[in-house]
Amino acid sequence: MGQVQRRGLDALSGFRGHFALAHWDQRAGRLWLASDHLGRRTVFYARVEDGWAFASDLRSLLALPGVSSELNDGFLAAALSDVPPEPDETWYAAIRRVPAASVVELHPDGREVPRGYWRPDEGSRLAFRKDDDYVEQARALLDRAVARGMHGNETVVCQLSGGFDSGGVAATAARLAMPRRIHALTVAPPEGMPLFEHPSFFGDERPLARSVAAMHANMAWEAVSSADLHPLDESPTRLFLAGAAPARGVLNVGWYGPLFDRARSLGARSMLTGGMGNMTLSWDGLCGLASMARRGDWWRLLREARALARRSGVSVAAVLRRHAIMPLLPPRLQARWAALRHGVKSDGEEFSAVHPEFARKHLIPERRLALGMDYPGDTAAMRRRWLFYIQSNPWTADWTDGLLGIDTYAPLSDVDLLEFSFAVPEEQYFRDGQTRWLARRVLADRLPPAVLNETRHGFQCAEFLHRLTLQRAQMGETLALLERSPLASRMLDLDRLKRLIASEWPTDAASTGFGEYGGVLHRGLHYGQFLRWAEGGNQ
């Protein structure tokens, strides 16, 4: 805080890590509230009589007299549709949030003056002499980011999946901690459990996680699993009481519960994760093909398209159409093309439980297209969209971490690493038809070939059908209650939820589509339970 007192807002751009702060400027007679660069931590505020109230969670503000608990319909419509809401809005009409990378000045007379303090320089490009120079710099930044997350932790615990991101973080932590032991925990399905399968995904991350641990003598690894529901699955009211909000990935909250329980039993206060790595260090670079087409770099485009076609087993024409031509069309035209050619909606529209009329009333289809949701673009467009999505969506780490008893820290969201990643030339990410080329080289000294050569992605909660089946009876009871809820009837497509519950329940996990059951049914019912809770219901 001394830096803020001396330098004012200029100090914030130099802050690192996840933070939220409040600062009273005595001389100017104003209050500053600030959120970190990506909004991983934030501050909520509301007007109360002739003053202001602020807190790091919604629950505290709602407990104050004079702060209305009326819900914000526009925010709910966006959240139900998985579209970024307005950056300063919340679930409640009377409560606002400080947007990411921003400061809000609050004055006694009721004035609010928001201003940003950071944005990545979109025009900045690094130009090192050798390819290895990018690798060396990325490794230095990765080491620094992980060290920040480890600072002050006597017990270091990392969440370890079978992918690049959490593997890179855990392996880096082990190298930095040597010879001190660190712990790596992997959430895994119970042995023998039927799993969702898809050519692009794998459900059991134990083998790859184990191979990472085998490279690092000081990494104590264990898999955590449970065939039973977690208490958070059985009573979502605990989530609402903790955060006064629903959880977007509610299926994963209970799935991750045993991992947090184990980390807590190890004596950890925080846990390192691989969050956001696919948008920084391990950016796949495929959208670079559209960038080549936009700037007329035809020779490189053709060479890379041929290489990608060989690797993926499709024609060069198909690669160019999908990755170079279509992304340059406006999202509205892409949507029309998809509807004409395939007759399908985008995933964001198809797998949402929002009531169609409620979505249309709040212009969700138009907002989705204006933001380019679900449709590819070139590198610049995809970077902007990703940053807006991350900064606009309220991060729930404050209250979920508190509920689960462990703070989480994502080193790959470190702003120094992010700015470096945005400035790295496209050809460092995608070369000779190979995606994530930078990450493969950066992590070659700390991850095994089995991980680096894996082209599929890990699928979280691959045993979701088992977990949903355990909740099936409760789902029917919940739906019956929602049909009596004015809010739920207006905002949710209850007829669609009813059809899914009443239809023949799937028994084959391998061929069951996740979106209908995990996205529409389970998540829709969870949001409905929140609406009933907000109305004063018992469940």
Image: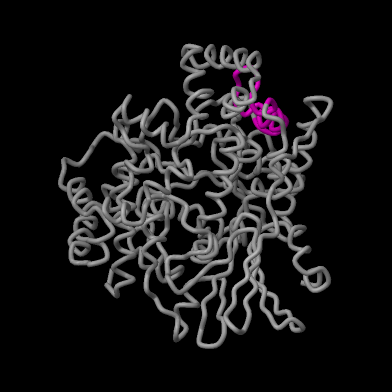
Residue 230 in the image: x percent, y percent?
38, 57
x and y percent of residue 522 in the render? 31, 51
Residue at the image point whose x is 19% and y is 56% from the top: 476
Task: From the top left corner, tell me how far across and down residue 92 is, in percent.
Answer: 42, 70
Residue 72 sits in which quadrant? bottom left
Magenta-colored stretch includes residue 318: no
Counting the numbered discs, the total is 0
Q: Is residue 318 left or right of residue 355?
A: right
Read off the magenta span.
427-447
Q: Is residue 328 above or below residue 49?
A: above
Between residue 497 and residue 454, name the one nearer to us: 497
Which image quadrant for residue 13? bottom right
From this viewpoint, is residue 528 visible? yes
Give above or below for 339 relative to 22.
Answer: above
* Residue 118 position by quadrant: bottom right
Residue at 70% across, 79% down: 24
Q: How is the image coloured?
A: one colour
Looking at the image, residue 529 sits to the left or right of residue 34; the answer is: left
Left or right of residue 82, residue 124 in this image: right
The quarter of the rendered structure image containing the C terminus is bottom left
* Image location of residue 493, percent across then percent down: 24, 53
Question: Can the viewer see residue 166 in this picture?
Answer: no
Seen from the viewer's position, the closer of residues 405 and 120 is 120
Q: Residue at x 69, y 42 (%)?
A: 122
The N terminus: image quadrant: bottom right
Q: Is residue 433 magenta?
A: yes
Q: Is residue 184 left or right of residue 508?
A: right
